Image (cartoon, helix red, strand yellow):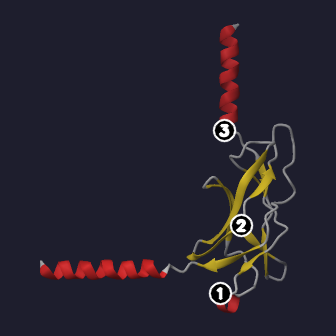
Amino acid sequence: MKKLIIIALAVASAATMYAQGTVNMVSKNVVSFGPHMGPLANTKVGSDFNGALMYEGQIMAAQPFAMNSKGEPTGKLKGDVVTTLLPPGTTVSGLTIWVYNPMNPLVVGESKPFSYTTGDPATMAAPDPWLNYESFMVETIIPEPTTIALGILGLGSLFIFRRRN
């Protein structure tokens, strides 16, 4: 009897370690380009950008942003139900949406943290109908001036020491 209880506990703990909750990748709020993006300023993000659901620094799910029937960007995620490594049927806090363009890593954006209730395929419990993050903007990453100055000093010192040898 003791062996049976130990085996049951081991199976239950293994199942929870590899739990797979579902997430409905639908957004009701819009992601747009920031005011410093030139001609793209204040326009919505399109299908050339991806939205990644992040939890504790890891990507749980990713999906491209959608276009409408006219081919115009909507600024909203495409909207499929995806399976993630988040625990099923629980409310998870501290999630963020990380927006990135695979072709241009300098244009990024991140939402404020939010909570979400995942779905459970085993009990047919549906996930929340949408990701409830606040609207936010995507900006270009501009290095801090001191970083540029340190880089120039480092390159200069490399050239000086190389010339001496």
Q: Which quadrant of the structure image shows residue 111?
A: bottom right
Q: Residue furthest left?
A: 165
Q: Which mark is residue 54?
A: none
Query: Which amino acid, by three-letter code, is at mark 3?
Result: Tyr
Question: What residue appears at the point 87 percent right and 48 percent down from the top-left corner?
Answer: 126
Question: What residue appears at the point 59 percent right and 71 percent down from the top-left corner?
Answer: 102
Q: For this view, does 162 lie left or right of residue 153? A: left
Per the image, the residue denoted by label 1 is: 37
Q: Which quadrant of the structure image shows residue 19?
A: top right
Identify the secondary structure beneath mark 1.
Answer: loop
Q: For this view, does 156 lie left or right of residue 18? A: left
| Crowdedness near tag 1: few (<14), some (14–19) or many (≥20) residues, C-alpha within 10 Å | some
Q: Nearer the viewer, mark 1 or mark 3?
A: 1
Image quadrant occupied by the N terminus:
top right
Spatial separation of the CA atoms under disc 2 and disc 1: 18 Å
Relative to 24, is 73 above or below?
below
Q: Earlier in the sequence, mark 3 or mark 2?
A: 3
Per the image, the residue denoted by label 3 is: 18
Question: What residue appears at the point 47 percent right and 82 percent down from the top-left corner?
Answer: 145
Query: Which amino acid, by three-letter code, is at mark 2?
Result: Ser
The spot of residue 92 in percent (x, y) is 75, 48
Identify the secondary structure beneath mark 3.
Answer: loop
Per the image, the residue denoted by label 2 is: 111
The spot of residue 38 in percent (x, y) is 65, 91
Q: Nearer the viewer, residue 147 or 140?
A: 147
Question: What residue appears at the point 13 percent right and 80 percent down from the top-left corner?
Answer: 164
